[in-house]
Amino acid sequence: MIDGRRATAIIVAAGASRRMGFDKLFYPLAGKPVLAHTIAAFEHHEMIDAVVVVAGENIARVRALAAEYPKVCAVIPGGATRTASVRAGMEAAGTDGIVAIQDGARPFVSEAVITRTLQAAVESGAAAPAVPVKDTIKVVDNDGFVQMTPPRETLMAVQTPQIFDAKHYAAALARCADDAVTDDCGVFEAAGGRVRLVEGEYANLKITTREDLAAWEKEEKGMRIGHGYDVHRLVEDRRLILGGIEIPYEKGLLGHSDADVLTHAVMDALLGAAALGDIGCHFPDSDPAYAGADSIELLRHVTKLLARQGYRATNIDATVLCQAPKLASYIPAMRARIAGALELDEEMVSVKATTEEGLGFTGSGEGIAVHAVCLIEKVG
């Protein structure tokens, strides 16, 4: 519901994908079909009450997929054109409230875009997201010669969802004599309606060609996540080193190197993200060369190992589990040391400290543990 009005999404998924050579709606993105991402965006939006999916020859597969989403109230066959498919969707959705018409092959639509467009449609009767055109556009004749160059600052690339007052849009569809119209706003405009454009997102792209998938896959495969965990015992007659910073305390951490448990967890996260094993593989405690080693220097070496594999760290988030001493005043210096070793801005390194309310070996003061998560990206 929005402003007391029922909101129904019509997802148009009846295309034949002829340019792709396979059904792009069932191409796996992050482990789920393209269409699943699109439906989920509206399924999980609190202002959307129902979802109608318009399918093509793939209707059996679409019905099986849509069964996982409670808001999907109908999966119906579409027509030979987009406008014909939208007509079918409108018949299933009804003419009460608001209708949001969405491309099935536009899986990256965000909650924010849907919300902005819904609110604008309620206020204006019709709205669509759009982004400024980046390239200069040329109008050409049938022979390929330029006829004119419209000013780029007046041009916008329209996206979906395109959202309308349901009764007004049904009336516009009834007056539309040209089913070759490929844009829902065009149907509304041809009937004399005015459409308000709101801020879209360049990420809200429609998958139309293989190149669209290739660009997504390149970006997806270029990012990797790693998790690291380490723990060391607190003992007397040892320095306490965390994140490359010596912290005054009556005890220190026991280990072959300087036992910097924070830096060790960060290294393990980075090595794991790049599938390069763990710190024991690279800096074994059986090797005297690493006795008392400065773990920040070891982290610099891990940075070089990543670079050889074509990766670099992009951010770190670490949590130190420590009952005592209090670490808050030392955290900025820790972040700076770790960031320097990774050749990162300090703002990309997060270090947090927490107690465990006296529970477990960390809570009893027997040791300190650290969890670290990292993101690395492919370079070039």
Image: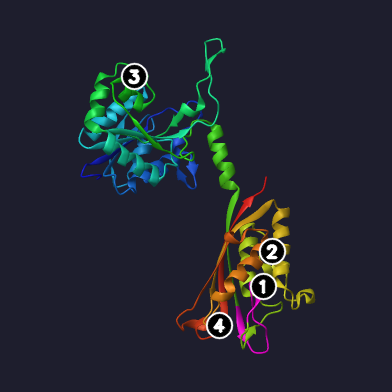
Disc on the earlier residue, 2 or 1: 1
Name the image quarter holding the N terminus.
top left
Amino acid type at circle 4 is: Pro
Kindly identify which numbered label has been placed on residue 341.
2
Residue contact at pointers 1 and 4, CB within 8 angstroms: no
Q: Which residue is mark 1?
A: 244
Q: CA distance from mark 4 to mark 2?
A: 25 Å
Of residues 26 and 100, the one nearer the viewer is: 100
Amino acid type at circle 1 is: Gly
Residue contact at pointers 2 and 1, CB within 8 angstroms: yes
Is residue 149 left or right of 181 when viewed as pictured? Answer: right
Residue 319's x, y, as percent?
53, 70
Q: Which residue is mark 4?
A: 325
Q: CA distance from mark 2 to mark 1?
A: 10 Å
Label 3 vs label 4, nearer the camera: 4
Q: CA distance from mark 2 to mark 3?
A: 61 Å
Disc on the earlier residue, 1 or 4: 1
Q: CA distance from mark 1 to mark 3?
A: 68 Å
For label 3, the SS is: loop
Q: Using a 10 Å C-alpha cutoff, classify the residue at mark 3 as few (fewer than 14 neighbours), some (14 to 19) or many (20 or more).
A: some
Label 2 vs label 3, nearer the camera: 2
| Quarter-of-image position of residue 48 | top left
Kindly identify which numbered label has been placed on residue 179.
3
| Quarter-of-image position of residue 160 | top left
For label 2, the SS is: helix
Disc on the earlier residue, 2 or 3: 3
Q: Using a 10 Å C-alpha cutoff, classify the residue at mark 4 as few (fewer than 14 neighbours), some (14 to 19) or many (20 or more).
A: some
